[in-house]
Amino acid sequence: DIGWLPNGTVLVTERPGNSKIFVDGPDASPTTTAIPNVRSTGGEGGLLGLVVDPGFSDNGYVYVCMASDAGSATDVRVRRLTMSRPDGDSIESSTDIVTGIPHNDGARGRHSGCRLVFGPDGYLWVGTGDAAIGTTPQDDDSLGGKVLRVDRNGNAAPGNPGGRLWFSKGHRNIQGMAFRSDGIGMSAEHGPSRDDEVNLLVEGNFGWDPVPGYTESVPMTDTEKFPDAIEAAWSTGSPTLALCGATFIEGRIWGDWDGRLAVATLKASHLHVYDVDAEGNITNDERVIEGEGRLRAVNQGPDGLVYITTDRRSDGDRVLRVTPVPVD
């Protein structure tokens, strides 16, 4: 993942547990800081999500989401780092604010990822995977297969169902979340053999329930079992693309792309761009930025440009910087 401090310092996470800190911008040599107790399986777990607190100038907070071996059993957790201000060139302290998100202890750490974004409501939104455990998406007492909504200390935000940490349930494997300046929020989610989904970030049940066992032949949104299940705003059908990180592209420099949703793809190795109307309906989509390998996270920087992290596995990873084409 990638984020920016108010003074322009760039933070980039690496799955094995490192944070690269570019104090003098993305073209300079970084400082590398190891995040303790990250359990990286080389698959779907490790150090993934990152978000800078909107109030960083006052509190110094940066949040990461990671698979952790700090306790008696591996889990996925949200850690709040207090970093030095203004440069963020060191970590002064850290606190785990959400623990107990389920982790798959298999060799690949299946569905053990986690993504973070601050919402316009001022709360931290956390997308979690189901850890490939069939019961977790519909289990109200589990934090797996959910969208959590919490405050800076990891407490449930007001308005969450039943006062729980989660805001919505019935998810399979959330890989990206983003909010637009008008308040529209959307997530990107992996399906099984079909139907990766783009979903609205709204309260409710999204209908994933792969039981008994972990049966992946059931629908991503099972409206027969759950008549009130929330349908996807968009789905891939078959084949899937392995949708991943997401951001809304905003600004006049982007012309017709102003307000569009950009989603990185892993398996399909391109950036998928969607037209999203004021009600959150997707009216058009297209593929761009192909040939760069697997794309993991996408974020718009404070300079208005779009930055994409790659997941090229054996070929060396990069951070791509994308600029709009000037229009006469």
Image (spheres, helix red, strand yellow):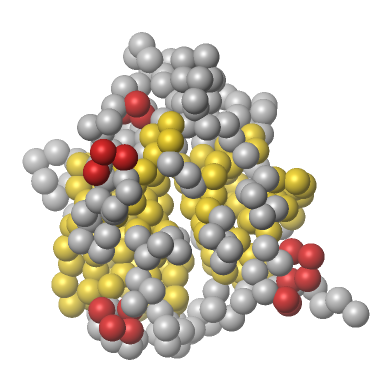
Percent across and percent down for residue 122 are: 37, 65
Image-quadrant location for residue 320: bottom right
> Foreground residue, 155 or 177?
155
The residue sitting at the top extreme is: 212
> Foreground residue, 216 or 17?
216
Residue at image coords 33%, 88% = 86
> Foreground residue, 324 or 186?
186
Residue at image coords 25%, 63% = 152
> Foreground residue, 316 or 311?
311
Percent across and percent down for residue 299 are: 54, 64
Percent across and percent down for residue 273 are: 70, 53
Q: Relative to 131, is 243 on the left or the right?
A: right
Give the vertical position of 3 relative to 117 (above or below).
below
- Total residue callouts: 0
Q: Relative to 317, is 320 on the left or the right?
A: right
Q: Relative to 78, is 171 on the left or the right?
A: right
Residue at image coords 27%, 60% = 151
**Is residue 202 in view?**
yes
**Is residue 39 in view?**
no
**Which quadrant is home to the N terminus?**
bottom left
Q: Relative to 46, is 302 on the left or the right?
A: right
**Which quadrant is home to the C terminus?**
bottom right
The residue sitting at the left extreme is: 72
Residue at image coords 24%, 69% = 81
Percent across and percent down for residue 37 are: 19, 55
